[in-house]
Image: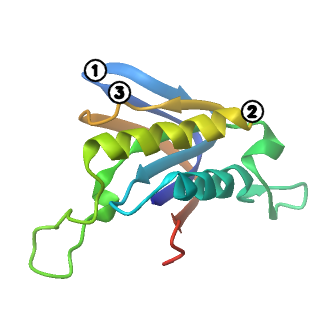
Amino acid sequence: MRAVVQRVRGCEVTVGGEISGEIGTGLLVLLGVGSGDSQKDAAYLADKVANLRVFPDQDDKMNLSIKDIGGEVLVVSQFTLFGDCRKGRRPSYNDAARPDKAERLYEHFVEILTGQGLATATGRFQAMMSVTLTNEGPVTILLDSEKKF
């Protein structure tokens, strides 16, 4: 499972011109599910996101987590995180999970964050979405449950 995590002042995701999810200060999580992923991967990544220290403390050092600041999380599914561009010019998505499995693990990831007391909004799985954000910092972190990066 892979995630691109961005610290934001605010963001929203729209589907067909309607807002599907929006947050204020917090984290935007673009989440990709791989074919070999399980609930263990979702739990690992959700815990990492919930406790990632990327918000400034009183000394302007990144020492605080989303939990510490009482921020929000917006989770958007993005299978393209498993796009493989090493061969040719068109990405291969062979390593991405099939939609039914990906949706179950995506929802499990969101449930874990919600269960940790985080206000969590979402996009709409398998929909064409537009994401608007104000990246703060900018701070962008890449996470992988297999610890590839």
- Which of these two is toward me, 129 or 47? 47
Residue position for label 1? 17
**Which residue is the extreme one toward the right?**
58
Q: Earlier in the sequence, mark 3 or mark 2?
A: 3
Query: Which numbered tag is attached to residue 117?
Result: 2
| Whether residue 66 is visible | yes
- Give coordinates of residue 132: x percent, y percent: 41, 38
**Which residue is the extreme one toward the top?**
18
- Which of these two is toward me, 114 or 80? 114
- Give coordinates of residue 2: x percent, y percent: 45, 61
Query: Which numbered tag is attached to residue 14?
Result: 3
Mark in front: 3 vs 2: 2
Mark 1: few/some/many CA within 10 Å (<14, 14-19, 20+): few
Residue type indicated by callout 3: Thr
Cα gap from disc 1 to disc 3, whole angstroms:
6 Å
Residue type indicated by callout 2: Gly
- Which of these two is toward me, 149 or 12? 149
Report the residue at 61% width, 50% height from top.
46
Quadrant housing the N terminus: bottom left
Mark 2: few/some/many CA within 10 Å (<14, 14-19, 20+): few
